[in-house]
Amino acid sequence: MVKKLTVISGKGGTGKTTFTSSFVALAENAVIADCDVDAADMHLILQPEISETYDFYGLDVASIDRELCTGCGTCISSCKFAAIGPELVVDTYKCEGCGVCEYICPMDAVSMLAKKAGEYYCSNTRFGPLVHAKLGVGEEASGKLVSDVRHRASELAEQNSKDMILIDGPPGTGCAVIAAITGTDMVLVVTEPTKSGIHDLERVVQVAKHFRIPVAVCINKCDINEQISESINDYCEDNGIPVLGMLPYDDVVIEAMVAGKTVVEYSDGKISEDIRSVWDEIMNVLFRQEKKDLVKLVQ
Amino acid sequence: MKIAIASGKGGTGKTTVAVNFALAIGNVQLFDCDVEEPNCNLFLGLDLEKQEDVSISVPKIDAEKCSLCGKCAEFCRYNAIANLPQRIMLFPKLCHGCGGCQIVCPENAITEELRSIGKIEKGEDSNSGISFFQGTLEIGEPMATPVIRQLQAHIDGTTVAVIDSPPGTACPVIATVGDMDYCVLVTEPTPFGLNDLILAVDVLRQLGVPFGVIINRHGSGDDRVEEYCHKENIPLLMKIPYKREIAVLYSEGIPFVEHMPEWKEKFRKLYHEICSISSENTLQQSCTKVSS
């Protein structure tokens, strides 16, 4: 069975992608999936060579044929998304592609058109295959694109006998996050010891529990506020969530990013050692613990 | 005047800027539109009072009337309705509430019922005169946009509205910044910061919303963000230095203008700069109203 690990953070900027790209460097036999599709950054470090490009179609968009339209306005009053203006122009940002206007138009003047909403790619990197994506500006359906990326990553894992899919997830708790974590074996939450960090951690942990996915936590920049780091530890202990690592702030992280390298490639210092030890813990939990023990973590 | 604080990348300091900016200018409405992870009130510490639920209408099927024809399932583009041999099965979380199933049902077996997906809360800060509104998406709910739309219905238009946006460039961001008068993009001087700034600039240019950039944690990373802004003629509104003191205050949920009063003045200056950049009459009127 291919194991799937998703790294998320709830709050942005905690170091999620920094960690994930180092894990990618440490993983021996993994497919990488960058599911932070509307602000993907991992390619900046992994410098992929794109080998296949796929078009992504999200939801259709309504289009009104002005020749046929009599201006009766039935579509305007039927649209629950207020996507058709008084001049009978469709606001493509507001249109959610439901097709009600097409159905209801007495003149058959509305058609639903497929709209390319982004692309996704299979690439080669120095650490193995990467599936990544680019969502078009302001597009809906980022959850669907995340699912497509994951689906392609699963196919690649099967074809290339990989034993793991490593997923870099998006921030937040909504559709993109849900699509990035459902059906995975474990979610690793990278958090930081700030009031925002702990608040957002608690919310994503609830999301993971809602979908019955085992969670583990890693505290980044733990020395910024040791008291809050302690509170995070307590919270995790009370909720049966393993804390796999506590990493102090280190300037090397930004230096590595500026150099376009993963932290473990760039430095042999303490921070790289810490990341390696978190990775060993993850491997231990994912591959050496029984599934039933993992399930226990959920309850 | 509606000013959004946004960023492509998460964790660059949107909330920090939004809260400190609102506190510095005072007597504004402040909206936390990052409904998946609302954080502004961690810095304000206000008692919040619930205003309303955010609900969307989802179908309710009368099994007596339903003939299992499956037209509803066929129509639904969100896979929220499945036609099984013995019954119609609903997946309410996938429903966008378009009402199409009700329209196509030949048996009139479908009615709508409201399903709550989030809430709107409000708090008043008597010291600064801030009227604060927060939207929260319920755990496990996928759709943030309806919560953002309903939250923004509370913008009263008589004073300045400062809006803390969610990160990214997808639909929740469009719903937030779409009809703003001005947008402040907060970034950090790193390759990730630059990459996501470029994406956000792309969004704002397509939407036609005027914008400028604040570099947070200035002094870390490299100069590429500044070079980019210069090359693209994007106003660089402010640089917030990379200081441990600011990071520690942030970690404790303390707005830094309260400890570093010189920044109050800087944010006020920023506000007046934004007003003068926005040359439209209507905007200037509302600016004068606040400053007088």
Image (tube, coloured by chain):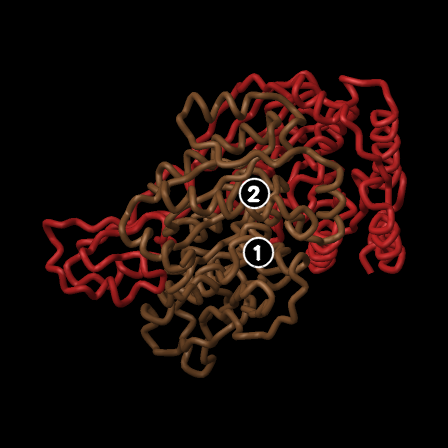
Q: Tell me the shade of chain B.
A: brown
Quarter of the picture containing the N terminus of chain B is: bottom left
- Dot 1 lies on which element? helix
Which of discs 1 and 2 lies nearer the camera? The answer is: 1
- Mark 1 residue type: Leu
Query: How many C-alpha atoms fall within 10 Å of the one at disc 2: few (<14), some, or many (≥20)?
Result: some
| Picture layout, residue A140 above or below residue A35 | below
Q: Residue at x 78, y 49 (%)?
A: A215
What is the chain letter for disc 1? Answer: B
| Picture layout, residue A126 above or below residue B193 | above
**Residue A267, position in %: x, y?**
80, 18
**Residue A244, position in %: x, y?**
86, 41
Write down the residue under mark 2. Answer: A147
Look at the numbered discs 1 and 2 and tell me whether their residues touch, using CB distance below 8 Å.
no
- Residue A165 sits in which quadrant? top right
Between residues B67 and B93, which one lies in front from this camera angle? Answer: B93
Q: Is residue B95 visible?
A: no
